[in-house]
């Protein structure tokens, strides 16, 4: 496939790059079924995901050569806009040090039943309840991808894993691991039980110690927000597990906790 011809942008108000204008503000209000990916590593991951369609790229002029191999794989109808750093910074509204942005179309979310029923007999999924921090959600998706989790379930309060910062922190993991939304934490547990999953909730008050448990063939790891943790009604319905810490010191970041727990569950 031939490399798309770069389209130079010299005017920050050029209507062709409207999708990239004021990136931070528009990230917060949504992009009509689209999302922004930032950085070379994330772009290379995105380009390999068939469920997302890249609609355009905006690149700093000095990044073209390093991305030549990737650009050659893009469909010819995908526009590749280029600009100098000053123009690019003016377009996006902040210094874009990586010099690489892409706009892609979101894939429709599957129903929770369809996602879970399509997984193998041995499967590991992650359930997130009330996680509003994009760094934590991105870190959890990074760990989920690293340890082979088959999917992630999100309650309504958990933030968007396709928010630009979450994708960046996940190093593209949010583009790799399938995910979907469920109406509530209780609905999440019900769906997991119906699909034959054992739900394991991480909590400082957990009745079992992580290092001593052996996961079921189908296991779901449930994680709550730092501070409040998982709701009491979910803890009452699930197997609760803790990670002991020195002197009872409870300070593990939830993304770090997910890495420890997923490592154990994936390899036990």
Image: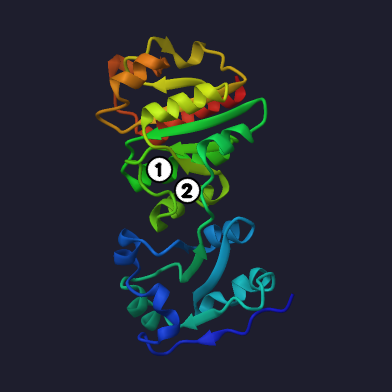
47 vs 166, left or right, is right
Q: Is residue 158 above or below residue 163?
A: above
Identify residue for label 2.
Answer: 170
CA gap, disc 1 and disc 2: 8 Å
Instruction: Say which element carries label 1.
Output: helix
- Residue on which disc 1 sits: 137
Residue 23 higher or lower than 245, as above or below: below
Asked whether the beta carbons under mark 1 and mark 2 sit within 8 Å of each other, the answer is yes
Is residue 149 in view?
Answer: no
The image position of residue 243, as x and y in percent, is 40, 19
Name the spot of residue 52 as percent of width and height, x first: 57, 59
In the displayed structure image, the side of residue 174 where residue 231 appears, left or right? left
Residue situated furthest left in the rendering: 227
Q: Quadrant of residue 124?
A: top right
Specify the quadrant that holds the N terminus: bottom right
Looking at the image, is 133 positioned above or below residue 206? below
Q: Nearer the viewer, residue 40 or 129?
A: 129
Q: Which of the two discs, 1 and 2, sits closer to the camera?
A: 1
Locate the C terminus and report the quarter of the image it occupies: top right
Residue displayed at 46% across by 87% down: 9
Q: Of label 1 and label 2, which has the lower sequence position?
A: 1
Figure quadrant of residue 113: top right
Disc number for residue 113: none
């Amino acid at each position: 496939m031939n490399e798309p011809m770069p389209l130079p942008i010299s005017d920050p108000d050029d209507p062709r790059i409207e999708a990239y204008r004021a990136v931070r503000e528009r990230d917060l209000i949504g992009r009509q079924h689209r999302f922004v990916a930032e950085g070379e590593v994330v772009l290379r991951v995105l380009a390999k995901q068939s469920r997302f369609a890249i609609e355009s790229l905006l690149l700093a002029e000095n990044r073209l050569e390093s991305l030549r191999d990737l650009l050659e794989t893009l469909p010819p109808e995908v526009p590749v806009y280029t600009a100098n750093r000053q123009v690019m910074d003016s377009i996006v509204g902040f210094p874009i040090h990586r010099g690489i942005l892409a706009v892609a179309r979101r894939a429709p979310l599957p129903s929770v039943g369809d996602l879970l029923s399509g997984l193998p007999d041995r499967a590991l999924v992650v359930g997130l309840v009330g996680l509003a921090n994009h760094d934590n959600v991105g870190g959890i998706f990074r760990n989920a991808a690293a340890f082979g989790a088959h999917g992630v379930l999100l309650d309504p309060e958990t933030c968007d894993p396709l928010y630009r910062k979450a994708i960046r922190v996940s190093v593209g993991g949010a583009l790799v691991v399938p995910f979907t939304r469920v109406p509530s934490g209780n609905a999440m547990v019900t769906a997991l039980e119906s699909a034959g999953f054992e739900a394991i909730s991480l909590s400082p008050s957990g009745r079992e110690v992580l290092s001593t448990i052996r996961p079921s063939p189908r296991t779901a790891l449930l994680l709550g927000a730092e501070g409040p943790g998982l709701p009491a009604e979910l803890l009452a319905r699930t197997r609760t597990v803790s990670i002991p810490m020195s002197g009872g010191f409870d300070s593990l970041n939830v993304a770090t906790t997910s890495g420890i727990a997923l490592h154990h569950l994936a390899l036990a």
